[in-house]
Amino acid sequence: MPQVTGGELVARTLKQAGVTHVFAIHGGHLETIFQGLVAHGISVVDGRDEAASGHAAEGYSRTRRTLGVAMATAGPGITNAITSIANAHLDRTPVLYLTASAGLANVENNMVQAGIDNVALTKSITKWAHQITKANDIPRLLAHAIRVATSGPTGPVVLDFPIEVTFGVVDEDIAPIPASIYVDSAPAPQAHAVEETIRLLTGAKRPVIMAGEGAWQSGTSKELRSFAEATGIPVFAHYQSQGLLPDDHPLYGGSFFKMAGLNEPGNRPDVILALGTRFGVYTLGSTDRLIPADAKVIHAEVDPVEIGRLRRVDVPIIADSKEVLSALNASLARRTAATPDLRAWQKTIQNTRARHSDRANSLLAHRDESAQIHPYQAAKAIVDSLADDAILIGDGAEAHQWVAEAARPQHPDSYFTHGHLACLGFGLGFAVGAQSAYPSRQVLLVTGDGGVGFTIAEFDTMARHGLPIVVVVMNNRVWGATRHFQEIFSPGRYVATELANTRYDEVAAAFGCRGQLVTKISELKPAIQAAFSSGKPTCINVLVEFSAMPPDAELLMSAF
């Protein structure tokens, strides 16, 4: 009877699951898995840091809306990966982390990279963490882990392999690869909740839809647009859900934070459909700055734990966002009553959005070519330089807020940023995953000089794998967000918030990428165009002024 290693069984199961890319750094404990991946035609994108490789798996997962896979070897490999696992956990990103550990016989023997319980280490930041102790269990438990990761609410899982499990051999007939791995787990809403939602929304004078991460994750763009256009209800979107409705659509009101502009009596929402939305920092906590205390709230969420977490909910719906919208559209099609005329309300929202845009643009008034580049000025130039189907990634504490202010995504898979972990430094790895997922699309990362430093060796990953990512570093020589925090709470006492004027373009060039320094706004667009034309990974180091806080920063601070 033919025998196979545990590593070969891992590779066969991943192949059956449709996995095409794995992001990792080599470690001897995982060697048989690496060999199996290559044998089965699965691309191995090897990075320079396990956190960055984990972020790459996140980037692949989020841009493709599919399972991402990362590997981390024993000891410092898994401890380095923790930040990515935590980020995937808080953002509900379905990533499978395959980790290694020392032999079971050596757990308490002070052997190299032993003595760490990887399951205990990751249990609080995963949907499921488990150690496989027998090679013949690999196909069954790996398939189970994939189902857990990709079932709603999605999230990361960790499967840990002691070295004797991946190097051990078993008869292949006692470890069959499952024929079917994925399941359709999208729960549908109850009929009475759908009808009550229609009743409240069509009876409202100032209804809005808040499309959260769940609305993006379940791919609701078509259904959301149909429902919004049929009812005339304006839509606001979470940072992570930009593009579900095209930015220039007349019913799109902007990000959640733009709702803060609806603060005049008689101009506040009276009924809100929170679709795939988790109440928290991006809804300004339990304050009423975005969601009025007297508004009727319909909360549709796949995770029952989130219903009513921070505020009263009038209609709870535990269901997948796409299923909710499909049911709402079907109910609406059966109605004979006319939908209310919301043109005045729509105009109010568009006027509010225009005022916000005018305030942002006023930051650039009366500037000339000799002035140091304003970060919003840079962000606008970046957005204007991109192809329609480009993938734009925002990293950094304030850099991502400036680019979010300028971004005008027309598609749901074109703008990405960090979420609840506020994970500075995720961007280089995320961009590696995004470019691996879409080799023919432009991928541009905007980050700060603080953010780029966390995993700066990923420029080497880009160069070795021929990933033509363009990285724009907004270099203001400070940790911007915390420096602004100190200006408010400790004026004149600035501690640990200054950075050197590092030539990040030259650092990238030393890793084999292109590099360019930009000191004038007129140089930025040509630099980006040249970068994409070159077909090579490029770092554009843009010297920007340390200026006023981004428009949304004050709102974010109010949520803490």
Image (spheres, helix red, strand yellow):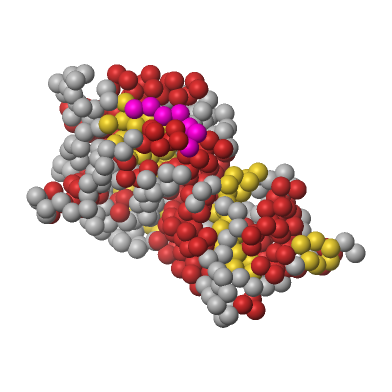
| Coordinates of residue 212 in the picture (x, y in percent) | 40, 47
Identify the residue at image location x=48%, y=37%: 511
Whether residue 283 appears in this view of the structure is yes
- As drawn, the residue found furthest toward the right would be 1
| Coordinates of residue 9 in the picture (x, y in percent) | 74, 59
Locate residue 112: give its quadrant.
Answer: bottom right
| Coordinates of residue 239 in the picture (x, y in percent) | 37, 43
- As drawn, the residue found furthest toward the bottom would be 108
Residue sitting nearer the eye, 18 or 260: 18
Residue sitting nearer the eye, 452 or 488: 452
Query: Eyeballing the image, is 48 above or below 109?
Result: above
Identify the residue at image location x=55%, y=77%: 110
Q: Quadrant of the C terminus?
A: bottom left
Left or right of residue 222, residue 515 in this image: left
Q: In this picture, which residue range is highlighted in magenta? A: 511-517
Locate residue 162: give its quadrant.
Answer: bottom right
- As drawn, the residue found furthest toward the left would be 492
- Magenta segment includes 508: no
User: How many marks on residues?
Assistant: 0
| Coordinates of residue 287 in the picture (x, y in percent) | 22, 56
Identify the residue at image location x=74%, y=57%: 8
Whether residue 13 appears in this view of the structure is no
Left or right of residue 356, residue 41 in this image: right
Left or right of residue 43, residue 305 in this image: left
Identify the residue at image location x=84%, y=66%: 171
Q: Quadrant of the N terminus?
A: bottom right
